[in-house]
Amino acid sequence: MSDFTSNFWSLYVAGIALVGIVACLLLLYFSGKAKAMTAHDNTTGHVWDGDLREMNNPLPRWWVGLFLITIAFALGYLVLYPGLGNSAGKLGWSSAGQYDAEVAKANQALEPLYAKFAGMPPEDVAKDPQAMAIGDRLFMNNCAQCHGSDARGGKGFPNLTDKDWLHGGTHEKIKETLVKGRIGNMPPMAAAVGSADDVRNVAHYVLSLSNSPHDALRASLGKPKFVACAACHGPDGKGNQTIGAPNLTDDIWLHGWGENAIIAMVNNGKVNQMPAQAGKLTEAQLHVLASYVWGLSNQPAAK
Amino acid sequence: MESADQTTRKVIPIVPAPVGAEDTSEEGAWGELYAAHQKIYPRSVQGIFAKWRWGFVFLTQIIFYCLPWLEWGQRQAVLFDLGVRRFYIFGIVLYPQDFIYLTGLLVISAFSLFLFTAIAGRLWCGYACPQTVYSEIFMWIERKVEGDRTARMRLDSQDMSLEKLVKKWYKHFLWIGLSIWTGFTFVGYFTPIRELGMEFFLGNMSSWEVFWVFFYGFATYGNAGFMREQVCKYMCPYARFQSAMFDKDTLIVTYDAERGEPRGARSKKADLATLSLGACVDCTLCVQVCPTGIDIRNGLQYECIGCGACADVCDTVMDKVGYPRGLVKYSTQHAMQNKWTASQTLKHIFRPRVLIYTGILLLVVALLFGSLLTRKSFKVDVVRDRATLARIVSGGNIENVYRLQIMNAAEKRQHFKVTAEGMYELKVLTDSEDLTVESTQSRWVSVRLQVPYDSAVPGSYPVRFTIEASDDNETGHTLLEEKSVFLIPR
Ligand code: SF4
Ligand code: SF4
């Protein structure tokens, strides 16, 4: 796709580059021809301030040679690399291409390292300090942006160090999440639940499920209205990992804790997305990363 | 020359030079803007300044060639390991974060250069600059193979013969050998030199090592063998700005024109007093020994690197003809004008600029060594988590996450304990109790700080981490404090 309807700008850029080089050549040619008047005491005859005189110290001729070399280099460069307007250059170089080549090279260099872990079961990988150090770096570069550098998440971003999983916490499930990404969809349910008061009652019922501070009367009134929610979260509110519906009976509040947060979720719904990482990471990297994340939630209890 | 109109004028006009009395014959000639390079054949020289220069050649080169072979404990004493980004200098292990020390070193180098230049001109150029030092070594080899100035000039003007071919090949063979050794030594500062030596002989150096050995070797060969004074004249930036550091009390190599002129050859027995001649016998030896090919008798010139070779050789001439030494000598412009004695000249060393340079130099040296001596055995960088500003965790606490990079700069294993203060009921949580960092390694750890919900109004609060280190033998406890902030969201 061309940015412009004509290739004027391409010619303009190419012209500037070439005219510049030709101008340098001409300058070199004419200054090589030029001569300066030099008096016997090797001054040029120019005097400033009465006694400050200009010496004639000619530049050595090999400087001219160096200039010619740079000009030859510039021309060679323009032939090989993109520089003349739209021309792609004989080498077909591009920064993206170079990046891909570097990544491929780095991955190849790392292959033997990863090969060691590829055949190991995740439990063993999670115990290997070297693998965990690699996993830590992969996590920092690819996951920490959302899940936090300590993997404990934040509002809207799940904590990966606890036992609570939206889509399942086995190694296979984690890897599946990594590869394909996930979309968590909570539709706006206010219409299905009823009036604003009904929504509030449901919120208190939800709070009661996990024994969080709640209004018992409102909770009992909200219980029948929970049917609308049970389709996903289950009649007992324990969630459903096949569709990624959160468990409401634990004390973990992905989208905020308390009455207002729950009411907002019921009224507005929410679409939460975990992007797929398949294209970015190699199979071996995914294996180590999944083992690392698995290890985070299965480590011996830490303080 | 002085006239009222000249001293008051504001514009600086460019006028043709007044044709001097002795310059009336012709106007001059048209010269080119570029000139072919004239090869210089410096004559060898002996004398006090030559001794000094060779002293510096030995000193600097012994350090350069030997330092990388020194061992310190289990490792190379001086190694700038770029691969793992650790710089070992005897007992000190520096991280890239310690680059401030390099700044200090550069400031010290710069001010030393200013100081020496203000006192004694191009001392650095004449005696210690690698360009001078390697040129000196290469010229020594050249002299050993091809002979001194006249022999070399004769050889170069001859047609190619077997003898010439052998001499030239032999010289380049020695030069290239030395160059490669120099390049090899240079790379040995950045990669363990003993292993590099093995790789070198087995022919399996990495491509970058090969590149740098030969690139540095090539630069040595080209600069010391061929470019020589042209580097000083056309490339060196220092040569250009140092004239700004000269004043009339700066030591320069000068020709005592009053005593020397009019110059001229004379018979050995002639009595100087009865001749209408000055002390200069016009032997032109001072021109022949000059490595930059200038005639010091024309006065101070920018090409002069202050090497003192002309002073050395003129002294030997003066000795021979029985005149007092010092027709060409280190002196200052003021001393020459006012006919000061040596002690009078010395007194004028201490002028404001010299004292200021000295003061700053001493200050920076003291700061650098002070901070090196009080340096902690580890370093910590505290980075607030880039993703989560703050979060509410179960239990009703507000939590902030930090990443601490703990860099163990000691060559022993250390254990670290992190505490923090600055807020009411501040709690510190780490994933593992045991924060161990192996010798010269660095490690990132996540640290969480918590305060009770509602214990402070929304805003940003300064907190202070204290990191305590202890080594395996519990011999030393070191504390380090780092500042950060705790955010409480609205
Ligand atoms: S070496 Fe001394 S005597 Fe000989 S030409 Fe030079 S200044 Fe004159
Ligand atoms: S003039 Fe004398 S001091 Fe200056 S570069 Fe030549 S020999 Fe050395």
Image (cartoon, coloured by chain):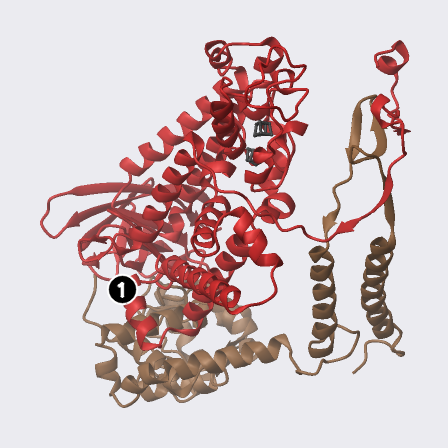
Chain colours: A brown, B red
Q: State the image quarter where residue A214 is shown.
A: bottom left
Among all residues in the image, which is located at the extreme left?
B473
For residue B115, side relative to residue B247 (left or right) = left
Q: Amino acid at mark 1?
A: Arg
Quadrant of image for the N terminus of chain A: bottom right
Ligand 2 within 8 Å, label 1 CB: no
Seen from the viewer's position, the closer of residues A152 and B310 is B310
Of the four image quadrants, the one with ligand 1 is top right
User: With B220 as the anchor, is B72 left or right in this view?
Assistant: left
At x 22% / y 83%, what residue is drawn? A123
The total number of labels drawn is 1
| B19 relative to A44, above or below | above
Chain ID at mark 1 = B
Taking the spot 33% from the left edge, 47% from the top edge, the residue there is B63
Image location (x, y in percent) of residue A176: 40, 88
Residue A166 in view in this figure: yes
Residue at the (80%, 67%) spot, across then down: A17
Residue in the foreground of this view, choosing between A150 and B71: B71
Q: Is residue A244 visible?
A: no
The quadrant of the picture occupied by the C terminus of chain A is bottom left
Give residue B333's position: percent from left, percent from top. 60, 18
**Relative to A285, does residue A206 appear above or below in the rendering?**
above
Q: Nearer the viewer, residue A78 or A10?
A: A78
Q: Position of residue A15 (x, y in %)?
A: 86, 69
Q: Secondary structure at mark 1?
A: helix
Residue located beneath label 1 in the image:
B194
Residue B135's x, y, as percent? 49, 49
- Disc 1 packing (10 Å; few <14; some 14–19; many ≥20): few
